[in-house]
Amino acid sequence: MSYAELTLSAWWSLSDEDARRTAAAIARGVDARLVGVGSHAYAGRSGRVAFFERDGLRYALVPGGAVRLGFDADRFTAGDRLRADFATAAAEYDLPGPVDRFLSAVTSPPRRASLPARLVAVRSVDADELLATDDEADEVDDHAGLTAGLHRRGLRPPTPDEWEHSCAAGATGLFRWGDEYPETGPYGELPLIREPNLFGLVIGDDPYRAEFTTDPVVLCGGDGGSALCGGYGSFLSWLTLATAYRDPDLAEALHEGGLIGETPVRPVLAIP
């Protein structure tokens, strides 16, 4: 079996010795250094993580397989505070209701996908910073240039499906930790967004840092800070960190504003 076929259930069911052996083989296959393999917990769930380093970037193993993605209104029950916050935001900003219909309009649709196992950067990196040593770094002014720069390093952006799976790590709530959110806005040292998720990734931790995917019009993990900076309240600000959140206008704003180099991407290292 190719290690790209490693599923989440298979990875977690390995013995510790077999997990280390598997991670070491993956490291050799991508010319990376295995940093470590161990147990990890997040938001009441526990599993196993493996970390790697290559060319100054740290990666985590994200197993693949058949996964469920997107926001499914039929499986969602809004809590009392979410409904109250939505009612306040709807009245102030003329949002269409009810809340589940609104959420469906600003998130990706429910779907199933089959994904490869892969190594995913633990933290996103601004395009200019990642490609700073390239002779062609100044030419990274569009999505194609960014993708080409990653390709020269043997990397690529995640697909939208891969990004969602990397963030959710099998969780099916609105957020990677569930359906509720703190009273404060999504900033500061809040464990829910600052702690690594179940795969060991620091992801969806800052609404300003929406990340590129392979689709030039789909960014994930934020809205560029619009809701938070605009003072839209806790519900709309937190919603931008929902795993399946989509802002259809963000990509156009970034491209027209010449902000490609300042926009983060989370490199993916394919497993052979």
Image (cartoon, rainbow, N blue to C red):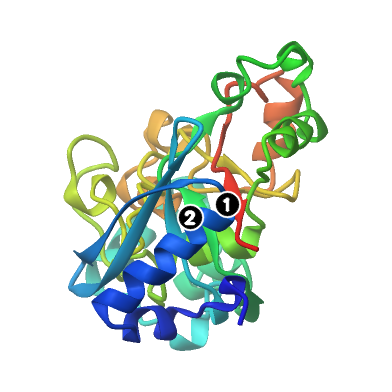
Residue 151: which disc?
Answer: none
Question: Where's residue 75, x and y in %?
Answer: 45, 87
Question: With respect to residue 139, does 185 lie above or below?
Answer: below
How far is mark 2 from mark 1, CA to CA? 5 Å
Q: Residues within 10 Å of mark 1 (few under 14, many from 20)?
A: some
**Could you tell me if the residues under marks 2 and 1 are in contact, i.e. CB atoms within 8 Å?**
yes
Residue 245 visible in the picture? no
Quadrant where the N terminus sits is bottom right
Identity of the residue drawn at 67% across and 57% down: 159
Q: Residues within 10 Å of mark 2 (few under 14, many from 20)?
A: many
Q: Secondary structure at mark 1?
A: loop
In the image, what residue type sits under mark 1?
Val
Quadrant where the C terminus sits is bottom right
Identity of the residue drawn at 79% across and 34% down: 148
Direction from residue 5 to residue 222 in the image, left or right: left
Which of the 4 image quarters holds residue 258? top right
Question: Where's residue 232, x and y in %?
Answer: 39, 40
Identity of the residue drawn at 36% across and 53% down: 51
Residue 30: which disc?
Answer: 1
Direction from residue 196 to residue 244 in the image, left or right: right
Name the residue beneath numbered marker 2: 27
